[in-house]
Amino acid sequence: MDIKVTNVDVAYIKEIDRKAEEVSKKIGRKFSRNEYIKMLIQNDAELRLIKIKEQKFDEAIKNLSVTLRRQENKLQEFINSNNRLFHLMASGEILEGDEYND
């Protein structure tokens, strides 16, 4: 798709040309003003997409953390229940403070 930009200050165009020339020296070939501007547009769009992806990743990590914490609590409840059961089987006594103690 073509984009036409008009009424751009000459100072900005000179700066773009200077930066395109710097890139040309680094890559060892002519890097045009058009290529430089296309690169700026692409980088801007990609940066926005990366930010959106980072936000979704952070949200997924938060949800995973909550799920793991819940699983940890349930596993601890299971371990405590097994400990009470083993104690009851071994000694015939119900542990003090056991919620199943009538």
Image (cartoon, rainbow, N blue to C red):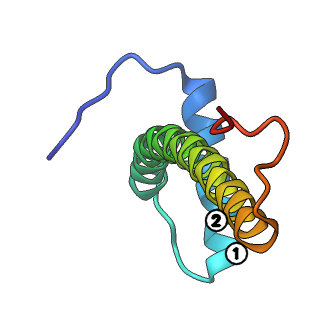
- Nearest the eye: 53 or 22: 53
Residues at marks 1 and 2, CA–CA distance in whole angstroms = 5 Å
Could you tell me which residue is drawn at 66 percent across and 53 percent down? 72
Do tag 1 and tag 2 residues touch (Cβ < 8 Å)?
A: yes
The correct choice, above or below, for 30 with respect to 93 in the image is: below
Q: Left or right: where does residue 34 sit relative to residue 62?
A: left
- Nearest the eye: 44 or 85: 85
The correct choice, above or below, for 85 with respect to 65 in the image is: below
In percent of width and height, residue 36 lies at 49, 53
| Local SS, label 1 | helix
In percent of width and height, residue 96 lies at 85, 40
Could you tell me which residue is drawn at 82 percent across and 67 percent down? 91
Could you tell me which residue is drawn at 24 percent across and 32 percent down? 4
Can you name the residue that lies furthest to the front here?
Answer: 92
Q: Residues within 10 Å of mark 2 (few under 14, many from 20)?
A: some
| Local SS, label 2 | helix
Could you tell me which residue is drawn at 65 percent across and 55 percent down? 81
Q: Residue type at mark 2?
A: Val
Residue ID for mark 2: 23
Asked where in the image residue 6 lies, by quadrant, the reply is top left
The correct choice, above or below, for 72 with respect to 29 in the image is: above
In percent of width and height, residue 66 lies at 58, 40
Residue ID for mark 1: 26
